[in-house]
Image (cartoon, grey):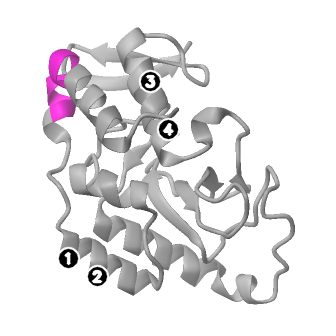
Amino acid sequence: MTPSVADSWARIETWLARHTPRAFAALEPPAEPSAIAAAEEALGQPFPASLRESLLRHNGTGYQALLPPFWMLLNVRKIVDSRQLRMRIYGDDLAGREEGDPESEYGPWWHAEWIPFAADGCGDYLIVDQRRHSRRGRIGDADHETGCSFSPSPMWASLPALLDATATALETGEPVEGYCRVAVDETELEWEDA
């Protein structure tokens, strides 16, 4: 059974505070529930419960890459801005496109029921797939050049699974998806090829 978002965050916070205090200090404070509600209204759909729970713990990670190998968690405002940007770019294409198999390893370039929650700083996002299918809630890598892909790895099955895998990799030092955590000068977290 996958640990809760709160349990995984507690493990992540403990490791960061002990080994990379600057990364720990960069974690944003909790989002305001009213800001989450306003964001959901702006997007026209609710956030998944796990994303809401994570935002109520930390409203993003600033410019610190927390998730392997280089993903920064977005704050509520950046979630809205990022999704609106992608909808402006791909909105016309979405209207006339058939969706295809929503459970496929590859998705369309963008979908109106995706919610970005992490970014790499180069135009790519991790998204929560909110389409109604049996794998709803899975995490996709929405690359701005190649479109979205979904890994079959259990780590990418949901946001709770991703946070748990991150916490476990931090605690054990074992590679996750080919990357190992590195504490740089005991102040910052980085992920390097294993």
Q: Is residue 37 left or right of residue 157?
A: left
Q: CA distance from mark 2 to mark 4?
A: 26 Å
Q: Which region is colored magenta?
A: 17-24
The reply to whether discs 4 and 1 touch (Cβ–Cβ < 8 Å) is no
SS under mark 1: helix
Residue type at tag 3: Trp
Residue denoted by label 1: 34
Number of numbered labels in the structure image = 4
Residue 144 pos. (x, y %): 63, 59
Query: Label 4 to label 1, Cα distance in Å?
Result: 26 Å
Question: Is 9 situated left or right of 165 in this image?
Answer: left
> In what quadrant of the picture does the C terminus appear?
top right
The amino acid type, in three-letter code, at marker 4 is Leu
Q: Nearer the viewer, mark 1 or mark 3?
A: 1
The image's mark for residue 38 is 2
Q: CA distance from mark 1 to mark 3?
A: 34 Å
Residue 58 visible in the displayed image:
no
**What amino acid does circle 1 point to?**
Ser
Label 4, secondary structure: give it: helix
